[in-house]
């Protein structure tokens, strides 16, 4: 599943890439170079993080589903059972 950013997210990401390059690499990136780098990251690296997120969500949901019977179970015929005990 391709990772796509909206206009605002793209602008924020480009700003972040340019700032990182300037501060950490002493490299001033123009708009085109920053966009090429962003596109590369989104295509090649971001899916790795996305897949980890999906796996984490799946693991969380599986744990929740395992607990569902204990959490949501309500015994039937509670009134009838109470009468039998007395």
Image: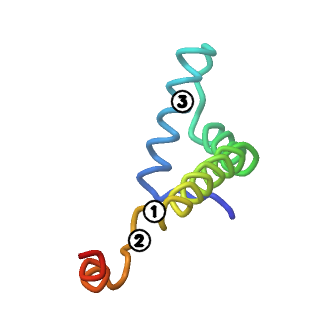
Asked whether the beta carbons under mark 1 and mark 2 sit within 8 Å of each other, the answer is yes
User: Which quadrant, please, contains the N terminus?
Assistant: bottom right
* Residue at position x 54%, y 30% in the image: 18
Mark earlier in primary sequence (2, 3) = 3
Please provide percent x and percent y for residue 54: 62, 55
Q: Quick one: 42 or 68, which is closer to the camera?
A: 68
* Residue at position x 58%, y 34% in the image: 30
- From mark 1 to mark 3, how far is it between C-alphas? 51 Å
| Mark 3, residue position | 18
| Mark 1, residue position | 70
Q: Quick one: 49 or 58, which is closer to the camera?
A: 58
Please provide percent x and percent y for residue 53: 60, 49
Q: Quick one: 65 or 58, which is closer to the camera?
A: 65
- Left/right placement of residue 9 relative to residue 65 reads left
At mark 2, the secondary structure is: loop
| Mark 2, residue position | 73
Where is residue 84, by image quadrant? bottom left
């Amino acid at each position: 599943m391709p990772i796509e950013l909206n206009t605002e997210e793209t602008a924020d990401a480009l700003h972040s890439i340019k700032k990182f390059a300037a501060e950490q690499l002493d490299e001033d990136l123009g708009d085109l170079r920053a966009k090429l780098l962003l596109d590369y990251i989104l295509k090649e690296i971001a899916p790795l993080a996305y897949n980890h997120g999906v796996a984490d969500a799946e693991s969380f949901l599986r744990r929740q589903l395992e607990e569902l019977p204990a959490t949501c179970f309500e015994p039937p015929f509670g009134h009838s059972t109470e009468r039998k005990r007395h």
